[in-house]
Each structure stands twice: as C-alpha cells, then as structure tokens.
Image (tube, rainbow, N blue to C red):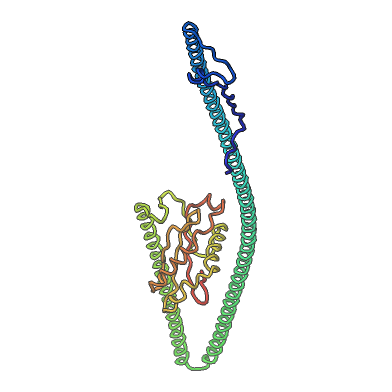
Amino acid sequence: MTAPKRPEVNLPIAPNAPQVRARATSVAQNTPAQDSEIPVPSNASDAAQKQIDQDAQERALEQARLEREKQNTERLRQAELMADAQREAARQEQLRQDAARAEQTARSEAARMEVERQELARQEGLRREALRQERARQDEKAQQEAARQELERAEAARLEAARKEATRQEQTRQAQLEAARQAQLDAARQDALKQEATRRDALRQEAARQDALAQESARQAAAKQDAAKQEAARQERARQDQAQRERAEQEAQREERLRAIGKQLDQEAAQRDAASNRPSRTLLPTVSSLRRGWLLGRADPNTDLVLYAEAMSRKIEMNMTFDMVREAVKQPHAPPMVTVAIRADGSVEKVTFVVSSGVAAIDEAIRKVVASQAPYPAFPPALARQYDVIEIRRTWIFDIAIRLQ
C-alpha cells in the first residue's frame, strides 16, 4: 500500500508583529540633541516635563501590554487554526482510509460473490452431468432388461419347442416299442400255434401208427400222453408260480420305493416344520401356509413349472460351476439326488439330499454351487399365483461339466 497523501490545506499565516518603538531611556531623554539648544528649565517646567514623561512611559507600557495580549491572542488563534487544520487533515485521512477499506470490502465481497457464483455454476454443471449419467445408466439398464427379457422369451420358446419335440419323439418311440412288442407277441403266438399244430399232427400220426400196434402199445402211448400232459401242466404251474413270484417281488420293490418316498416326504415335512419353528438368520422363515409345488422328474402337466426348473438347471450347468467340484469328484462317489427348494423371489430356502454322493466334500460343494448361483429368477406371474415355494429334484452327474438329470 502506498503512503497516504496528506490533504492540501491552506494553513493560516500569522501577521507580522507590529513595530514597537523602544522607550527612550532617561539618558536619551535627558541628552539634548546635537545642534540644539537646551534651555535650562525651571523647577516648574521640570516637574511638568517629568509628569509628561511619566504619562508617556505609562502609555508605552500599556500599549506594549496590549500589543503582547494581541500577539498572544493571535498566536492562540493561529494555534487553534493549525489544530483545526490538523483535525481536518486527520478527518480527511480517516475518511480516505474508510473509503479505501469500504472499497477493499466491496472488492472482497465482489470476489466472494464471484467465487460463490462460479462454485454454484460448477455444482450445477456437476448436477446436470450426474443427471445425464444417471439417465444414460437408466437407459442402458432398460436396454439390458429388454434384451434379457427378449432372450428369456426366445429361450422359453426354444424350450417349449424342444419339450414338444421331445414329447413327440417319446410318443413315437413308445408307439414303436408297442408295435415291436405286439409284433413279438404275434410272432410268438404264431410260433406256438405252429408248434401246437405240428405237435398235434405228430400225435395224430403217432396215434394212427400206434393203432396198428398191440393194445399194450396203445396203453403205453396213452400213458406217455398223460405223462406229457401232466409235465406240461406242471411246467405251466411252475411258470405261473415264477410269474407270481416276480410280480410279488416287483410289488414289494414298488412298496419299498413308495415307503422310501413317503419316509423322505415325512422327513422333509419334519424339516420344514422344524425350520418353521426355528427361525434362521440367513433364510426367510418357512411357514406352514406357504403354497408348495414339487417337480420330482423332468415331466409335469404344469408347463410353467417345467420351464422354470429347466432355467434353474441351465443356470447351474452353464456358469462354470464345475470348477467348484472338480477336485472333489475325483473321489469315487455315487450320483447324488438333490432337492432344491426355491422361493418365489428366487432365493434358496433349503438344499436336501435324497441320495448322498457318499463323499462329504462333494455334498458340501453341491451346496456351495447352489448358493453361488442364487438368487435364481423370480417366479413368472402365472407360477407365482400357484406356488410360494417350488422343490425341484435332480440327479447330479459330473463328467466334464455339471449336468442335472
């Protein structure tokens, strides 16, 4: 900052002091002027002259006193004028400094307002950029969602076509098997008829030939025929007994499977009841009022249920999950049969092993695979209107990948 400039104030100038004539001393007064004649005063004139001189001296003293008072008054006035000038200069300087401070404050305020304006403009620009980026993300998300839905529709259509084709092929294969079985039965019946006809012809011929023999031969032939009939009856009874035993064994096996399935269903119901009475911190609570659906194979009249199970299996098979079980499946094991319960929102309720692999590491790896792919797709609206939970049972096969059968 530059030094403040002193105000230009015209200071008053003191007037020159008046000239005062020095009072003549008594010697000068008493000394007569040169070339003048000094008369010799008388006593009366001397007294008058002394009175005059005394009066003149008093007037001179009075005049000097007045002059000194005047000078003192003038000096006081000059001092007051100088003090007023100094005060005015100080006031002007204070006003200048106040103006400078006000100008500095105004400049600082203007700079602050400019900084605030620039900051507001920057924040507005950032807000607009954020809004633009958010709209761009939403547009991209909408496009991805539309693409995903289109892929799901295409996949559902492909699965439906594949299901229809598989159904048609299965019906064709069943028809072919039925036709082959019927053809075999017809061929066997024809062979039996031919053999029976041949046998009857042989018997008739043998009877005709035996008619020429003696009665003993006829009796022996009759006895042999009776024995043959009895053997045939015995063989027929043995065949019937064998068929009955086979049917009994099949029925027993079927009853055993039904009992195993019932036992498994009872265990699962007990587990569900236990889960409903024991809240979990990781899974949603299972309550008895949940509508549950089961898909224990690959075929079901409910097409939506089949398609959802296929989508879940495909997600597990196609997402490189085999690496999670690659080391474990090198151990000898049985193909595990696993039931996965999925809620309507796609979360996993539980994983149940109907048939264990026999290797704890493989069973644990299967649980990790199922959990790693969660959440699964939410139920389609038509399926969600029917069920709250779906239990899907599959047999897990491990070769070069994971396949769910």
Q: Position of residue 24 (x, y in %)?
A: 51, 19
Would you say 114 lies left or right of 217 here?
right
Extreme residue toward the top, this view: 44
Q: Position of residue 351 (x, y in %)?
A: 43, 62
Nearest the viewer among 83 and 263 is: 83
Nearest the viewer among 289 and 101 is: 101
Q: Is residue 249 visible?
A: no
State the residue at coordinates (65%, 61%): 154
Q: Quadrant of residue 153?
A: bottom right
Extreme residue toward the bottom, this view: 213
Q: Quadrant of residue 246?
A: bottom left
Q: Position of residue 392 (x, y in %)?
A: 48, 62
Q: Position of residue 170 (x, y in %)?
A: 59, 69
Is 62 above or below relative to 228?
Answer: above
State the residue at coordinates (53%, 51%): 384
Number of residue marks: 0
Q: Quadrant of residue 192?
A: bottom right
Nearest the viewer among 123 and 244 is: 123
Q: Is residue 281 visible?
A: yes
Is 96 above or below relative to 180?
Answer: above
Nearest the viewer among 81 and 257 is: 81
The N terminus appears in which quarter of the rendering? Answer: top right
Would you say 330 lies left or right of 166 here?
left
Is 370 above or below relative to 292?
Answer: below
